[in-house]
Amino acid sequence: MSLTKAKAATRRAFGERVVELGKIHPDFVVFESDLGKSSQSNLFGDAFPNRYFNMGIAELNTMAAAAGMAAGGRTAFVASYSVFLTMRALEAVRSFVCYPKLNVKLYASHGGLTAAIDGVSHQGTEDIAFMTTLPNMKVLVPADSAAARAACDLALETPGPVFVRLMRDPLYEIYEPGEKFVIGGSKVVRPGADITIASYGDILFQSLMAADDLAKKGIEAEVLDLYSLKPVDTAAVLASVRKTGALLVAENHQARNGLGYELAVCCLKNCPVPFDNLGLQDTFAESGDYGLIIDKYGFSAAKIAEAAERLLRERRTEEIHSPALGG
């Protein structure tokens, strides 16, 4: 699949789709905590002011109010920065939304270091760990506009809590409008036979660029878009690594307790292969240019390609010295 420059961020595509669905479904409501312009939920507020609730800078109360509305039978979207929805409001998400399995959909902008320029306080680099840990929560991370629109549809039509992680800035488009996505699904966006690179969201693009660089050296990387992080498509991952024999996970998140940890356990139980995962290594990031920041912390295209080559060198060394392989 080829990359084209995006004209709008996933937060914008999601916000526009919420408005479109609002015209079709007259009952759902949107809550936010004084960040409507940043999350793009203000588009819904402009279209449906009687169904839009700005609760002020009080995310815990906002989430609790949305849970109350959902308990009364109306689906509620809650929009804010990912870091605020998953930290300031975490107790309400856990106890008031996930425990009773309410139809509350978290509409989370500025995920990971896509909020690079906004600094550590606004960078949600632990959000996936929190949300995938909560029972009854579904987690989606669309990479582009088509995927964001589909994620909005999936969130609305899927019973129970759903968390959708969105980006701050426009990056690239990869999918055609109308592309189909499902809860628990994934996509092979580039086939290959030498190593599997699993990613999601913005780092999917870096993974594809890395695969292009690797191809110039005769290494064919298979790139997976694991847009559904919970449930995650372990069957697709296992099918890929059984073919390639190595797995590299790259994600815009803390390396600890992210997708890499889950897939490491999956492979250890089912198909042990040489493995590495790229993400923040137990550190906060800093404020700065997005491209420079993701390179500094190790999950730019160049760093992904370097890690893939390193992993393949390690695999060859193990094969040479493994008695089981005749070394």
Image (cartoon, rainbow, N blue to C red):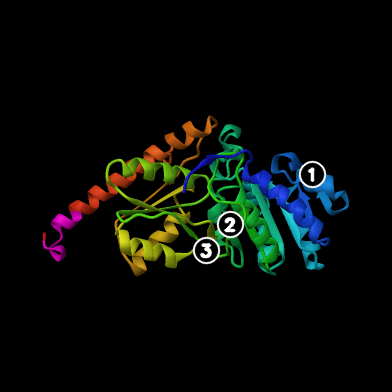
Q: Secondary structure at mark 1?
A: loop
Q: Could you tell me what secondary structure mostly forms the magenta stretch?
A: helix
Q: Amino acid at mark 3?
A: Gly
- Residue on which the image places disc 3: 185
Q: Quadrant of residue 105?
A: bottom right
Q: Earlier in the sequence, mark 3 or mark 1?
A: 1
In the image, is 77 to the left or to the right of 114?
right
Q: Quadrant of the C terminus?
A: bottom left
Q: Residues within 10 Å of mark 3 (few under 14, many from 20)?
A: many
Residue 240 seen anywhere in this rendered image of the structure: yes
Give percent across and percent down for residue 57: 76, 43
Give percent across and percent down for residue 276: 35, 51
Q: Amino acid at mark 1?
A: Gly
Question: What range of the chain is rendered magenta?
Answer: 318-326
Which circle marks residue 179 in the picture? 2
In the image, is 28 to the left or to the right of 149?
right
In the image, is 48 to the left or to the right of 164?
right
Q: Amino acid at mark 2?
A: Glu
**Mark 1, mark 2: which one is toward the viewer?**
2
Q: Which residue is at the front of the view, 28 or 218?
A: 218
Q: Earlier in the sequence, mark 3 or mark 2?
A: 2
- Residue on which the image places disc 1: 56
> Would you say residue 292 sits in the magenta stretch?
no
Distance in Å between CA atoms under marks 3 and 1: 36 Å
